[in-house]
Image: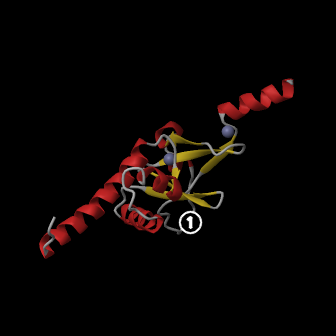
Amino acid sequence: MKKGFHSQLNSRGYRLTQQRQAILNELRQADHHLTAREIYTAVRRYLPQISLGTVYRNLDVLEQLVLIKKFEHRGLFRYDADIQDHYHLFCQYCDRIEDIPKSQLGDLESHFNWETDFQISHYQLDFHGSCVACQKNRADQERA
Ligand SMILES: [Zn+2]
Ligand SMILES: [Zn+2]
């Protein structure tokens, strides 16, 4: 296929869009919070040309567009396609991270009487504990 200037631009733009879309799809389909490397491995199955650097760059763009969120856990950045306010439950024994909708906790902000002039734009609240599978494993181990 012959490539003119125009079609080159188009194909470049399309490729970028396609990569970004693929990354977003992977995140939305995943039932957990993926790392950039996990996204890279998944997307490479059908976009074999993609590099880890490109995945990082596209993740940055998606984050700037507020289509995804990023958080750090155990020294690794994980990405979240759920951009609604929610909290995370981190299992101390495995890598499991579960979501708790904000609504299940009620309006936390109203529980605090902020006697401060500090203007709070956002806050982070993490819960740590033991997931159901790890509770079971540990119970089994104690029984053995
Ligand atoms: Zn666990
Ligand atoms: Zn989440």
The front one of 123 and 18 is 18
The front one of 113 and 24 is 24
Tell me what residue is drawn at x 71 percent, y 45 percent: 92
The front one of 119 and 82 is 82
Identify the element where label 1 is drawn.
loop
The quadrant where residue 51 appears: bottom left
Q: How far from the left and from the top, in percent, is residue 10?
A: 18, 67
Q: How far from the left and from the top, in percent, is residue 84?
A: 41, 48
The front one of 109 and 134 is 134
Residue type marked 1: Thr
**Quadrant position of the C terminus in the picture:** top right
Task: Give the labeled residue for mark 1.
Answer: 116
Residue, far bottom: 5
Q: Report whether residue 28 is seen.
A: yes
Q: How far from the left and from the top, in percent, is residue 78?
A: 53, 55
Q: Is mark 1 within 8 Å of ligand 2?
A: no
Label 1 neighbour load within 10 Å: few <14, some 14-19, many 20+: few
Relative to 34, is 66 on the left or the right? left
| 101 in relation to 3, above or below | above
Tell me what residue is drawn at x 39 percent, y 54 percent: 23
Relative to 32, is 68 on the left or the right? left
| 92 in relation to 61, above or below | above
| 132 in relation to 54, above or below | above
- Quadrant for ligand 1 reads top right
Q: Report whether residue 123 is seen.
A: no
